[in-house]
Amino acid sequence: MDDVLDELFAVVEDRKENLPEGSYTTSLFTHEKGENAVLEKLGEEATELVLAAKDDDHDELVHESADIVYHLLVLLSMKDLDVDDLRAELAERR
């Protein structure tokens, strides 16, 4: 899974730097609400994740989990953090 997270984070970072038109990730970095757009998406996705878990909908739970991880990576990038920062924090909690 590390490879997938690293690859996805590299895409997020590339979108942040190059801001290609038509990219959803670019739209998050350039949204008029700034980082609030990503924070709102995280809140929305968290609610959807909770509802999927409550409904015992495994497919939707996986889908919403991926949405949470993606938006979290965008937020980390916005705050000049990266996947290694997340790994270090998780390693400390073992």
Image (spheres, rainbow, N blue to C red):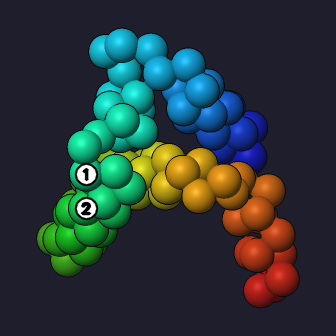
Q: Nearer the viewer, residue 38 or 5?
A: 38
Q: Is residue 23 above or below residue 1?
A: above
Q: Secondary structure at mark 2?
A: helix
Expressed as whole percent of the image width and height from the top left, the position of residue 32 reads 25, 43
Callout 2 touching callout 1 (CB < 8 Å): yes
Q: Residues within 10 Å of mark 2 (few under 14, many from 20)?
A: few
Indicate the position of residue 59 as horizontal and vertical percent values. 29, 50
Amino acid type shown at disc 1: Lys
Residue drawn at 59 percent across, 49 percent down: 77
Q: Which residue is mark 2?
A: 40
73 over 36 or under it: above or below: above
Label 1: element kind: loop
Disc 2 residue type (three-letter) = Glu
Is residue 76 in sight in this rendering? no
Looking at this view, name the residue that lies furthest to the bottom.
93
Q: Which mark is residue 33?
A: 1
User: Which residue does the image show at 41% across and 39% down from the upper left?
Assistant: 29
Q: Position of residue 66 (x, y in %)?
A: 43, 49
Residue 77 shown left or right of residue 91 in the figure? left
Task: Return the residue nearer the eye: 68 or 17.
Answer: 17
Residue 39 point in image, percent of width and height: 33, 63
Farthest residue in the top direction? 21
**Mark 1 crowdedness (10 Å alpha carbons): few <14, some 14-19, many ≥20:** few
